[in-house]
Amino acid sequence: MSREEITPHRKIFVANWKMNGTSSFAEAYGAFFREKYQDVPKNTFTIICPPAPYLKILHDAAQGIVLLGIQNTATERKGAFTGEISADMAADMGCRYGLVGHSERRHLYQENNTIVFEKAVRLAEAGITPILCVGETYEQREAGQTACILAQQLQGMGRLPLTQEVIVAYEPVWAIGTGKTPTPQNVQETHRTIHAILRAEGLSAIPLLYGGSVTAANAKDFVSLEEVQGVLVGGASLKCEEFLSIVQSIEL
Ligand code: PGA
């Protein structure tokens, strides 16, 4: 599968395991997708972001059936940065996608928009498509600041190298891991706002995902929207059967 195949009609499903799993979990997950290959709808991209130590295990077990993503990479290219993983290393491990700007990184690790942008640039330079996560907190939403926050988070996107290979995931912070979701109409409106912001940055046709408490029960509500090109799934992606059902939701 090549990147060029991301077309508006191809839905994208991203699993973010966060800091969960074991080597045997990764092996079983990959084997499940390999076995269920025929059940994965053809017009989909399935991207799995396991913890970095399990990338190869997942890759070998899935035998190319799923695409690999890295959850986090460094702002620097290489050198004395103990504990960091560079974008080049992720590419070397077979990752074609990389999360950046996830709300847990922004809030728990104080990654501001400058750091997020640096990381996105490193990913793009390494030939990895950044999946840039943006979203407002509950307080910001209540204060009517959503569009302003999104514009700040997306500022400078037009200067990214290889901009045609960027994916944006709208993940309202208050919806992540809470079981609460915006209504599909809300997501539709916010995605239109994001498209307008991106157009002002000189970017068009950027795939937009929705993320935040997506499950097999509600995935269809989001992926059936024209403005939504896919979903980013955390908790519900930890069950391979449920994640497959989410991917299959385009057929319901
Ligand atoms: P969730 O996480 O699906 O568990 O809400 C989504 C995410 O953090 O990307």
Image: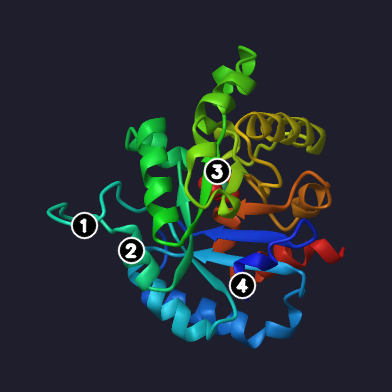
Q: What residue sits right under mark 4 in the picture?
A: 2
Percent of width and height locating residue 69 = 48, 63
Relative to 216, residue 227 above or below: above
- Going from N to C along the chain, the mark reached first, 3 or 4, is 4
Q: Is mark 4 within 8 Å of ligand 1?
A: no
Mark 3 or 4, which is nearer the eye? Answer: 4
**CA separation in Å, label 3 and label 1:** 33 Å
- Going from N to C along the chain, the mark reached first, 4 or 1, is 4
Considering the image in quadrants, where does the N terminus appear? bottom right
CB of mark 3 within 8 Å of CB of mark 1?
no
Q: Amino acid at mark 3?
A: Gly
72 left or right of 201 in image: left
Percent of width and height locating residue 242 = 66, 65
Tell me how many marks there are. Answer: 4
Give the quarter of the image for residue 24. bottom left
Mark 3 or 2, which is nearer the eye? Answer: 2
Give the quarter of the image for residue 124. bottom left
Relative to 226, residue 17 above or below: below
Q: Which mark is residue 31?
A: none
The answer to whether residue 158 is visible is yes
Q: Amino acid at mark 2?
A: Asp
Q: Which mark is residue 78?
A: 1
Considering the image in quadrants, where does the C terminus appear? bottom right
- Going from N to C along the chain, the mark reached first, 1 or 2, is 1
56 left or right of 198 in image: left
* Along the viewing direction, whichever of 47 and 245 lies nearer the viewer: 47
Alpha-carbon neighbours of circle 4 within 10 Å: few (<14), some, or many (≥20)? few
Q: What residue sits right under mark 2 in the picture?
A: 88
Relative to 16, residue 158 above or below: above
Percent of width and height locating residue 43 = 77, 70
